[in-house]
């Protein structure tokens, strides 16, 4: 089993070196988290999404690979900021416009006052094709705000809201549907190992982003972890068929 895991990580690193760079904001499984990269630190992710079922059209839809860096850019302990970009490929016409940008500003728990929640605001999926006549627009431009608090034994609970570009985010009837709730629970399962982490998150809306997501992560080294998760899209007509996801996360320096 150890040899299989090491081979998987080596393959992911090879893909990272050979493919255009990209990134998502610091996330749970699917939605953004209140975590923000520290100053002068970076993060590389290699995420894959493999279809596991049919959508309403009776097809499985394309698989997706998402690669990229995120960097911490503010030298403050109580106010942090990260920036990054994504290159997302799925073998469709969207590959002609693969780059998406993101940024996040946040404060850790207890930084504003004792027992204060972590807070974060940001934007992601800022695509480069905003041509109104195009059938493959990528300017989802999803803005969000989140609050999170860690409770003894329970873990961390997060809640927030997002709003994106209604011209791109539609429901299955083609109506504007660019906003919804963000909810999550995550926890280090220290009863088993400090290297084991679990999470469930939810993104509301009847658009392509709406989903419920489950996952566990194992930290193989101080700066390397892998998430194994499953994504259930709440509206298969817009989100496609469900996916199994693996997410290799590498922190540096």
Image (cartoon, rainbow, N blue to C red):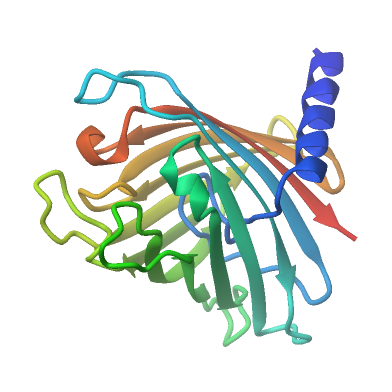
Above or below, 100 against 9 in this view is below
Left-right relation of 106 to 168: right
Count of numbered labels shown in the rendering = 0
Residue drawn at the location 73% of the way across and 69% of the way down: 71
Left-right relation of 225 to 211: right
Q: Which corner quadrant holds the N terminus?
A: top right
Residue drawn at the location 23% of the way across and 18% of the way down: 58
Q: Depth check: 66 or 252 in front?
A: 66
Q: Residue furthest front?
A: 133
Q: Residue furthest top?
A: 1
Q: Depth check: 37 or 119 in front?
A: 37
Camera sees residue 154:
no
- The image shows residue 128 at horizontal and vertical percentages of 48, 66
- The image shows residue 87 at horizontal and vertical percentages of 60, 52
Above or below, 168 against 103 in this view is above
The image quarter in which residue 183 lies: bottom left
Q: Which corner quadrant holds the C terminus?
A: bottom right
Camera sees residue 215:
yes
- The image shows residue 108 at horizontal and vertical percentages of 62, 74
The image quarter in which residue 80 lies: bottom right
Q: Depth check: 81 or 89 in front?
A: 89
Residue drawn at the location 58% of the way across and 87% of the way down: 112
Left-right relation of 238 to 201: left
The image quarter in which residue 8 lies: top right
- The image shows residue 104 at horizontal and vertical percentages of 56, 74
Q: Depth check: 149 or 28 in front?
A: 28
């Amino acid at each position: 089993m150890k040899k299989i895991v090491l081979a998987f990580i080596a393959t992911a690193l090879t893909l990272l070196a050979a493919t255009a760079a990209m990134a998502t904001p610091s996330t749970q499984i699917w939605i953004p988290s209140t975590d923000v990269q520290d100053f002068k630190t970076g993060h590389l992710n290699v995420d894959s999404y493999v279809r596991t079922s049919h959508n309403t059209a009776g097809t499985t839809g394309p698989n997706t690979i998402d690669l990229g860096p995120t960097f911490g850019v503010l030298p403050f302990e109580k106010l942090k900021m990260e920036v990054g970009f994504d290159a997302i490929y799925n073998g469709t016409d969207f590959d002609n416009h693969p780059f998406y940008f993101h940024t996040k500003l946040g404060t850790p728990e207890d930084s504003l006052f004792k027992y204060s929640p972590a807070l974060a605001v940001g934007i992601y999926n800022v695509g480069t094709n905003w041509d109104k006549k195009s059938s493959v627009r990528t300017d989802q431009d999803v803005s969000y705000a989140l609050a999170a608090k860690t409770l003894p034994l329970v873990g961390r609970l997060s809640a927030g809201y997002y709003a994106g570009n209604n011209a791109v985010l539609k429901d299955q009837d083609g109506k504007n549907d660019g906003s919804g709730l963000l909810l999550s629970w995550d926890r280090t399962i220290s009863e088993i190992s400090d290297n084991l982490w679990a999470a469930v998150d939810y993104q509301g809306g009847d658009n392509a982003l709406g989903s419920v997501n489950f996952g566990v992560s194992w930290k193989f080294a101080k700066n390397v972890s892998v998430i194994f998760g499953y994504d259930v899209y709440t509206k298969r007509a817009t989100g496609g068929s469900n996916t199994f996801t693996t997410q290799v996360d590498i922190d540096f320096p």
